[in-house]
Image: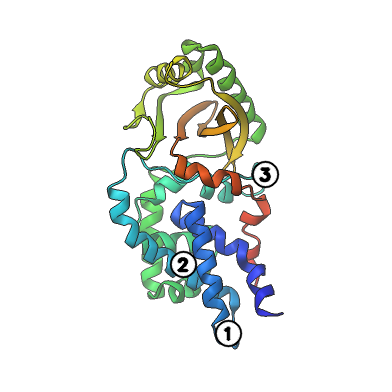
Amino acid sequence: MNRFALFVQYRSLLFAIAYRMLGSVSDAEDIVQEAWIRWQTTDSTVRSPKAFLSKIVTRLCIDHLRSARVKREQYVGTWLPEPLMTESFINDSAELAESLSFAFLLLLECLPPTERAVFLLREVFDYSYDDVAITVGKSVTNCRQIVHRARQHLELRKPAIDQSSQVKDGLIEQFLAYWHEGDVQALMVLLAEDVTFWSDGGGKVVAAQKILYGCQKVARFLVAIQRSRLTPTLVTQMSVINGQPGIINSVDNKLHSTFSFEIGGDRIESIFAVVNPEKLKAVGRSQVSTAALSLQSDRES
């Protein structure tokens, strides 16, 4: 198999790693492109193209996260990942669906870059500890300790994603109906008592600067958005964002925002609203198939 064909074979895996590491479609695409450039100048005697390419992408992501840390600290308002549009719900692997969700990607933000890479490669992509150690340049023992600590840390805050797509769809359909009706009380029934609303405007557009807490406050805020004279009439449609139920909001046929949801039982536990126009640029070009984010390719030998 020639060099180009080998890269194409693993490109979906490389993007899957990069997106989960960075939470950015555009940055993940750039990392994969850089990996392709380096792959073209590599000695043709590479024994394991998969391991070699994974190592390149992982280390590029670690370097990027370290360089972006100052930018993240200076970010205006709440930071959220870039929405990733997928064709359908991911039901064949709860592990895969969870690792793409906004809730999980935000949890990963509490892990330093190298620790994040170790955890993802081992727990999500099922790499052996030997391969993980070579990829990040640490000992196997150290990698085992990192995974153990990360499991304990994330388990305390880990969202439960165990509902069927039908249950999620039904709940979001109700949400949309009550939201359009401006029914605060009905919305409150759908929201968990301690629901959170996250809004990412990046300082470029009007958005809530802080996370909102509580069903009453969130329901009132949502209805206020619909009724505000500052916000033109929103045209909404259901979609699948990061493998989970979501909503795309448009104004005059132009993308305005996306809503993603974390659902627990029969209640909405978190709403993630991306309004930052820079992050919404990726929505139009990030329609990818579920297969492109599957764990199958990286479990191949």
**What's under tag 3, amino acid-wise?**
Glu
Residue named by callout 1: 46
Comparing 182 with 202, the one in front is 202
Viewport quadrant of the C terminus: bottom right
Q: Exactly how many numbered labels are in the figure? A: 3
Q: Where is residue 177 in the image (x, y as percent from the top left)?
A: 59, 17
Comparing 160 with 175, the one in front is 175
Kindly report the distance in space between the C-alpha atoms of the residues bearing marks 3 and 1: 35 Å
Say whether residue 159 is visible: yes
Q: Do the residues labelled 3 and 2 touch (CB within 8 Å)?
A: no
What residue is shown at x 66% (from left), y 75% (from top)? 4
Residue named by callout 2: 58
Position of residue 124 relative to residue 74, above or below, is below
Comparing 245 with 193, the one in front is 245
What residue is shown at x 49% (from left), y 68% (from top)? 57
What residue is shown at x 65% (from left), y 41% (from top)? 89
Residue named by callout 3: 87
**What's under tag 2, amino acid-wise?**
Thr
Q: Earlier in the sequence, mark 3 or mark 2?
A: 2
Instruction: Assign a secondary structure to mark 1.
Output: loop
Kindly report the distance in space between the C-alpha atoms of the residues bearing marks 3 and 2: 26 Å
